[in-house]
Amino acid sequence: MRWLFAGLLFILLVLQYRLWFAEGSLAERHRLERQFEEQTRINEQLQARNAALEREVLDLQSGNKGLEQRAREQLGLIREGETFYQFVDVPPAVPESLAAESPTATSSSLPAENTAR
């Protein structure tokens, strides 16, 4: 009876080892499930990107409208007869009270050769 109990205990330990640590174990299954979820998320992102690229390719193949829009946005090109206007943002003016305190903003700090003109 003692040998039977020892044999069953040994089989139980071997099966527990396979369940928790060996190939095909619960830990490996959990790792593979996480890896599967991550790959699924990556695939969804890539499918969305591919769909956007496919729409862009079809738009460029369908005519000049998409090509013209791309040239205008990325290269700054204009059509013949059009006038291009560029607006430049001017930095806000420094209040006079702050300008008087700053030594670089006063005319007395300029070199003599620049003020003699």
Image (cartoon, rainbow, N blue to C red):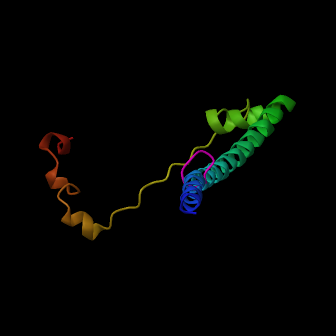
Magenta highlight: main SS: loop
Q: Which residues are magenta?
A: 20-25
Outermost residue, front direction?
1
Which residue is at a point 73% across and 46% down the rendered structure image? 48
Which residue is at a point 73% across and 32% down the rendered structure image? 79
Q: Residue 83 location, x and y as percent? A: 67, 38
Q: Quadrant of residue 3?
A: bottom right
**Left-right relation of 43 to 54:** left
In the image, is residue 68 above or below residue 98?
Answer: above
**Left-right relation of 94 to 87:** left
Q: Residue 29 location, x and y as percent? A: 63, 52
Q: In the rendered image, is residue 51 in sight?
A: yes
Q: Residue 64 location, x and y as percent? A: 82, 30
**Is 22 within the magenta?**
yes
Q: Nearer the viewer, residue 67 or 27?
A: 27
Which residue is at a point 20% across and 61% down the rendered structure image? 102
Q: In the rendered image, is residue 65 in sight?
A: no
In the image, is residue 59 above or below residue 102?
Answer: above
**Is 63 within the magenta?**
no
In the image, is residue 68 above or below residue 96?
Answer: above
Q: Nearer the viewer, residue 28 or 21?
A: 21
Q: Residue 85 location, x and y as percent? A: 61, 43
